[in-house]
């Protein structure tokens, strides 16, 4: 049943006792009370901006509800999210504009987009660490890696153009490529960590399919992911595994 019907019936009953054009009086009264559907107006709630925030468009005779409706709250939350993104732009620019990789920053509604031009693999690894980007938050194309993270409660997209290892794959220079954290590692060569030690792959994988690496002459194996997380960034050294460790074991 139309929830307006009881109120409409009560109003009709009251106005039937009046004088003059009773039908017109009843029609105008029902319309003024917002009990008639106007085909020229949109269905559903319509909001307008006021100095106090979003408010529903309602007939003058109908008082506004004391508490914001769910739709009003959603509209206010959206405005607040876009404002936080706009404010974060100034913070990002002030913090990172001097970095050689930094290209620019802009707001895309409630999201901040940071653009970087990466010329060294270690620089991209450093940005990932600084901004808290992990592998699960990355997507990659031939020329750009997109990382998603948050700063405060603002969603951030980081566009890293021309990451060197991505270029290597595009040029088919990586003989045994493996993607981790949005980067391509060539398992055919060793990789030097931040302490100066070099790690090599010999053909073994973990149960999850992650390459296992070891240092020269040591039996211990660590996943590539663990080495990157604990001792990264790791950088390729163009010394084939076969030359360093006598070939693969498998």
Image (spheres, rainbow, N blue to C red):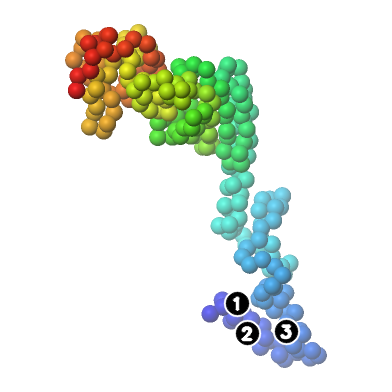
Residue at 72 percent of width and 91 percent of height = 17
Q: In the image, 38: left or right of 75?
A: right
Q: In the image, 214: left or right of 194?
A: left
Q: In the image, 142: left or right of 227?
A: right
Percent x, y of residue 120: 49, 16
**Quadrant containing the C terminus in the rendered view:** top left
Tell me the residue that label 1 is attached to: 4
Residue 9's tag is 2
Comparing 1 with 234, the one in front is: 234
Q: From the viewer's perspective, is residue 10 above or below residue 161?
A: below
Q: Image quadrant of residue 79?
A: top right
Q: Image quadrant of residue 168?
A: top left
Instruction: Of the two numbered discs 2 and 3 on the same chain, state the one appearing first in sequence.
Output: 2
As drawn, which residue projects farthest toward the right?
20
Residue 60's tag is none
Instruction: Of the two numbered discs 1 and 2 on the same chain, state the one appearing first in sequence.
Output: 1
Q: Image quadrant of residue 236?
A: top left
């Amino acid at each position: 049943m139309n929830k307006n019907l009881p109120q409409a019936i009560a109003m009709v009953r009251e106005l039937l006792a009046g004088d003059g054009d009773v039908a017109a009086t009843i029609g105008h009264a029902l319309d003024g009370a917002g009990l008639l559907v106007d085909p020229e107006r949109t269905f559903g709630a319509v909001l307008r901006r006021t100095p106090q925030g979003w408010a529903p468009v309602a007939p003058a005779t109908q008082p506004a509800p004391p508490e914001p409706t769910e739709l009003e709250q959603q509209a206010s939350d959206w405005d607040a999210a876009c404002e936080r993104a706009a404010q974060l732009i100034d913070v990002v620019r002030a913090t990172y504009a001097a970095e050689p990789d930094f290209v620019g920053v802009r707001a895309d509604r409630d999201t901040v987009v940071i653009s970087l031009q990466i010329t060294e693999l270690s620089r991209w690894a450093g940005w990932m660490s600084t901004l808290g980007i992990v592998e699960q938050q990355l997507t990659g194309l031939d020329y750009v890696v997109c990382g998603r993270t948050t700063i405060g409660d603002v969603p951030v997209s980081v566009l890293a153009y021309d990451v060197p290892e991505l270029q290597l794959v595009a040029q088919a220079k990586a003989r045994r490529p493996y993607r981790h954290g949005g980067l391509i590692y060539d398992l055919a060569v060793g990789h030097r960590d931040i302490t100066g030690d070099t790690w090599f792959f010999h053909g073994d994988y973990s149960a999850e399919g992650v390459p296992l690496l070891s240092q020269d002459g040591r039996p211990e194996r660590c996943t590539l992911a663990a080495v990157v997380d604990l001792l990264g960034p790791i950088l390729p050294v163009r010394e084939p595994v076969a030359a360093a460790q006598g070939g693969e074991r498998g």
